[in-house]
Image (tube, rainbow, N blue to C red):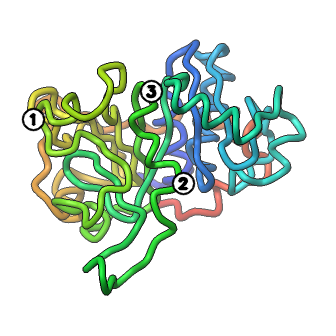
Amino acid sequence: MPEATYTWAEMMAISISHEMADGAFGSVGAASHIPAAGLRLAQLTHAPNLSFFCGGSGAMNPKIQRLTESSADYRNLVTSEYHFSLDDVVDFETAMRFDFAFLGGMQIDKHGNLNMAMIGDWHKPKVRGPGTIGLIFLGGFRTSYIYTQHHTPKIFVDKVDFVSGGGWLDGGDARSKVFRPESDGPRRVFTPLGVFDFEPESKRMRLIKVHPWSSVEKIQAATGFELLVADDVQTVGAPGDEELTLLRTQVDRDGVLRRYPAVV
């Protein structure tokens, strides 16, 4: 493996940036500094009309240069274009105003369902989480993106113990029987090891991009179910100097993303 000059967190932010479309309007949750960095980078490069809302703080399009580790941090408000109330946010979600949202979970299964409530038996769980939180609104987003800072078989499970947020449910056309037709399931999954989509018919998670320090075999070993692998799976190239410089000087001047390991 070549000598690393960037961290996996920076690579994730850049991978997220590449997937964003100009003109879209989305939301990030509380612990979402990596997606927020990716969205801001997209605004500074190919998607100047992309807009995003920081759920915890109410900040709309914060012009961050010093990345905060939580979107609930009040510092996001200092450079934001607008401050939304919680009532506004709930209205946006129920009225399907958001084009996308970035979400994660303690468990993520092969159909993109998320669990933030509990792990184990409902009456005597091994782990208690914070609950469904904003995941309950997954039917109010036009699509969603899943991200996680860890990729292990305990997180990527065959079936979540509790569905806090519905992805593609049981696969196939299961989601269309429950949610409004305007609301698609998750589009991409971003992890330190790679990028995934969902196979169009089965709606099962499928590996489409491998980060430079990983491999198909390593990713399968870190996943608790059998992954589908795209025929044309790609190895993501190292970030260009211009893109990495922009990330470090205009988005993350304090080096929050550089505190993570350079290799996974």
CB under 8 Å between callouts 2 and 1? no
Instruction: Look at the image and tell me whether residue 210 can be seen.
Output: yes
* Mark 1 or mark 3: whose residue is earlier in sequence: 3
Please tell me which residue is depicted at 36% across the width and 46% down the height of the picture.
211
Say left or right for 150 vs 41: left
- Determine the secondary structure under disc 1: loop
Please tell me which residue is depicted at 46% across the width and 71% down the height of the picture.
129
Quarter-wise, where is residue 115 in the image? Answer: bottom left
Say left or right for 91 vs 143: right
Of tags 2 and 3, which is closer to the observer?
3
User: Which residue is denoted by mark 2 in the rendering?
Assistant: 7
Say left or right for 229 vs 118: left
User: Could you tell me residue 54's position as x and y percent?
Assistant: 68, 41
Name the quadrant of the C terminus.
bottom left
- Determine the secondary structure under disc 3: helix
Q: Which mark is residue 148?
A: none
Q: Amino acid at mark 1?
A: Ser
In the foreground, 169 or 87:
87
Q: Is residue 84 above or below residue 151?
A: above
User: Which residue is denoted by mark 1 in the rendering?
Assistant: 202
Please tell me which residue is depicted at 10% across the width and 55% down the height of the picture.
226
Q: Amino acid at mark 3?
A: Glu
User: Which residue is denoted by mark 3 in the rendering?
Assistant: 19
Quarter-wise, where is residue 26 in the image? Answer: top right
